[in-house]
Amino acid sequence: MSAPTLLTVILNWRTPQMTLKAAEAAAREMAGIDGQIVIVDNDSGDGSFEQMTAAIAETDWAGTPVEVVQSGHNGGFGAGNNFGIRHGLAQRDFDFVYILNSDAFPDAGSLRALMDHLTHTPTCGFAGSYIHGEDGTPHLTAFRFPSIWGALEGAARIGLISRLLHRHIVPLPIPAETTRVDWLAGASMMIRRAVLEEIGLFDERFFLYFEETDLCLRAQRAGWHTDYVRSSAVTHIGSVSTGMKQWRRIPQYWLDSRLYYFRKNHGRLTAALATLAHLVGHLLWQLRRLIGRKPAQDPHLFGWDMTRHYLSVLVQRTPPASPQTPTVPLRKEAKS
């Protein structure tokens, strides 16, 4: 049996030096692995593509081929990664595809651990890493699928509600060992190519957020499961490109992605109830915050922005666009 092969895709948007650092860390961990790294510049428009193209010729990549490609259009996280996956798999067959954030840096043995797990667990479609910050603080990256009750609990942040709805809490406690989960954050995720052949790539209707949730759900419905591999560790800075930690108002693309996820996967009624549950939870949190004099945690006017967004979608005369689950010629002979 031949050794498994690996395609690593790293998406850049206006963080060229950090992206190169992530690629160097990945190349170090790919030493001895038959694979390739594709860096996708997602139409940064700031000279990132030129800087990275020049830098790869001057960097020691430990024998791993590295290529920088230009997407030509910033269609978001899913579209950019789809571009890199298509590009890599059009050149040769790979057994696994590894998605790595531009602000994530694989620790020693991390990629091997994911590859070994997928190789020895044939029913596993996705394997993700234990993610920690630069100071060693663990990050929440293992989750249950979103639900109506999960929306209420997550927005309310009240102990009694969380205890009553503990089986619906979306973020899972950080696993101490390898375990099955519903979905994983896409900062460090390895995917079996056979899964992509069966279900397609990221749905490009999601600009940012919920795209990996949707992909894992589609895989689960097709009979594949997702595993959190505790022995694979990755250092992650987090929110460098998106600025999520500094959001003053909730972005339109987050609201679009959340509503589209529920409508696409669970229907309009569930989407409406999940939105209502989120707003009720938000109101409960605001009451608790005022009574307890707690600091604000949500972006400014969050409840108003979510309400306005949902109502604007509700009154649209044109139906929402159909789900976009791109396929790709995953085998070289399928190329036109």
Image: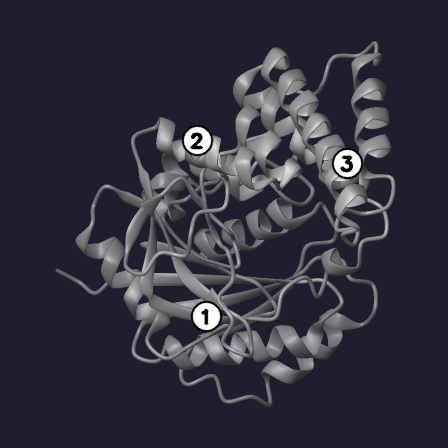
Q: Which circle, 3 or 1, is nearer the viewer?
A: 3
Taking the spot 37% from the left edge, 75% from the top edge, the residue there is 30
Q: Nearer the viewer, residue 135 or 219?
A: 135
Vertical order, 219 against 313 (above or below): below
Residue 249 lies, in percent from the top left, at 85, 46
Instruction: Find residue 287 and name its label.
Output: 3
Residue 35 lies, in percent from the top left, at 37, 68
Residue 52 visible in the current orientation: yes
Q: Are marks 2 and 3 in contact (CB under 8 Å)?
A: no
Q: How far apart are marks 3 and 1 (CA)?
A: 38 Å
The answer to whether residue 83 is left or right of residue 60 is right
Mark closest to the chain's N terminus, 2 or 3: 2
Q: Which of 30 and 172 is in front in this view?
A: 172
Residue 162 lies, in percent from the top left, at 52, 37
Q: What residue type is labelled 1?
A: Val
Taking the spot 42% from the left edge, 82% from the top edge, the residue there is 28
The residue that mark 2 highlights is 218
Q: Which image quarter is the N terminus in?
A: bottom left
The residue that mark 1 highlights is 234
Q: Distance between the residues labelled 2 and 3?
A: 37 Å
